[in-house]
């Protein structure tokens, strides 16, 4: 099902890019956008993990690099992977004070989990286990490909919309000239469309990953406690996170953008906690 969703997402975003090319520069723009869409689909599938990690400023942790962090995280992740039947993912740390985390990759064999320094400082080991089990839940449910692809394509759509604003309607050829007003509309509507797609993808995924955390840690209270700290941290500490990646994090980052919370990519923390509370004793 997630493979089908990924294909549909790539097709929908490609269609939006091609339409944007038509609006910006007529037939020539549509042809150029078609080639861009093909290249974008290829890079989104094979390189979305690297793009997400690079965009977040994540740094690899290993036995020799950031070893203190590695030896705190690795035993927890290894134990969870054994219970969940997953290969060991690559581990990363993000130099941000806001507590947060995300998983990325195209499948369980090519997966990465990244946490912020703020999360390591704010959480107990039990709470970290709850968060990591949530992220590994995304890996097990094969959510990571579609979320990584959505982040890459949303960034491309936003870039294309900005190009529409600056270059729309600038050609001399009447047959290829776009409409400047339509180009401005594209700048507004394209990122909105990308955000709405991200929102539709993300909200139900979070409940499933929360349930996986409760199941494989054996204690919903670990994630409940972590979510409370994550919510408090996200309200208090701004994070330098690209808006196109906000749906990937366990809690939507506070980026400081006034419109960033208009269309939430996550269900409310209160609702997530309530659902976890209902799992106690099951």
Image: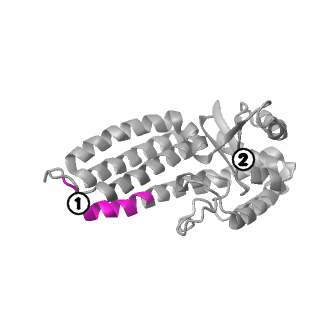
Q: Which residues are magenta?
A: 177-191
Kindly tell me whether residue 184 is visible in this rendering: yes
Image location (x, y in percent) of residue 160: 37, 51
Q: Is residue 214 on the magenta stretch?
A: no
Q: How is the image coloured?
A: one colour
Q: Relative to residue 153, is residue 212 drawn left or right?
A: right
Q: Earlier in the sequence, mark 2 or mark 1?
A: 2
Q: In the rendering, at what x and y percent does residue 106 appear?
A: 57, 35
Q: Which residue is mark 1?
A: 179
Residue 282: x and y in percent read: 82, 53
Determine the residue positioned at 64% across, 30% down: 109
Categorize mark 2 by other alpha carbons within 10 Å: few (<14), some (14-19), many (20+).
Answer: many
Label 1 packing within 10 angstroms: few (<14), some (14-19), many (20+): some
* Residue 282 visible: no
Q: Nearer the viewer, residue 158 or 208?
A: 158
Magenta stretch: dominant SS? helix
Q: Does residue 3 appear to the left or right of 176 in the view shown?
A: right
Residue assigned mark 2:
115
Q: Secondary structure at mark 2?
A: strand
């Amino acid at each position: 099902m997630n493979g089908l969703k990924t294909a549909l997402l790539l097709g929908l975003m490609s269609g939006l890019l091609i339409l944007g090319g038509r609006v910006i520069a007529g037939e020539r723009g549509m042809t150029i956008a078609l080639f861009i869409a093909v290249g974008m689909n290829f890079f989104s599938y094979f390189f979305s993990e690297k793009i997400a990690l690079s965009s977040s400023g994540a740094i690899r942790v290993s036995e020799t690099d950031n070893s203190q962090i590695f030896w705190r995280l690795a035993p927890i992740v290894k134990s969870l992977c054994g219970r969940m039947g997953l290969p060991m993912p690559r581990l990363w740390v993000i130099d941000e004070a806001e507590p947060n985390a995300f998983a990325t990759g195209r499948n369980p064999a090519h997966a990465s989990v990244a946490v912020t320094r703020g999360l390591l400082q704010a959480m107990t080991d039990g709470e970290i286990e709850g968060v990591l089990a949530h992220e590994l839940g995304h890996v097990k449910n094969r959510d990571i490909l579609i979320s990584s692809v959505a982040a890459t394509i949303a960034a491309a759509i936003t870039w294309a919309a900005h190009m529409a604003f600056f270059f729309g309607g600038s050609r001399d050829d009447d047959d290829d000239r776009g409409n400047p007003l339509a180009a401005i509309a594209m700048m507004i509507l394209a990122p909105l469309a990308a955000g709405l797609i991200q929102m539709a993808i993300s909200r139900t995924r979070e409940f499933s990953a929360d349930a996986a955390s409760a199941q494989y840690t054996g204690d919903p209270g670990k994630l409940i406690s972590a979510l409370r700290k994550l919510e408090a941290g996200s309200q208090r500490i701004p994070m330098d996170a690209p808006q196109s990646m906000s749906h990937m994090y366990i809690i939507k980052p506070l980026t400081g953008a006034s419109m960033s919370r208009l269309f939430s990519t996550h269900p409310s923390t209160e609702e997530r906690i309530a659902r976890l509370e209902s799992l106690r004793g099951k």
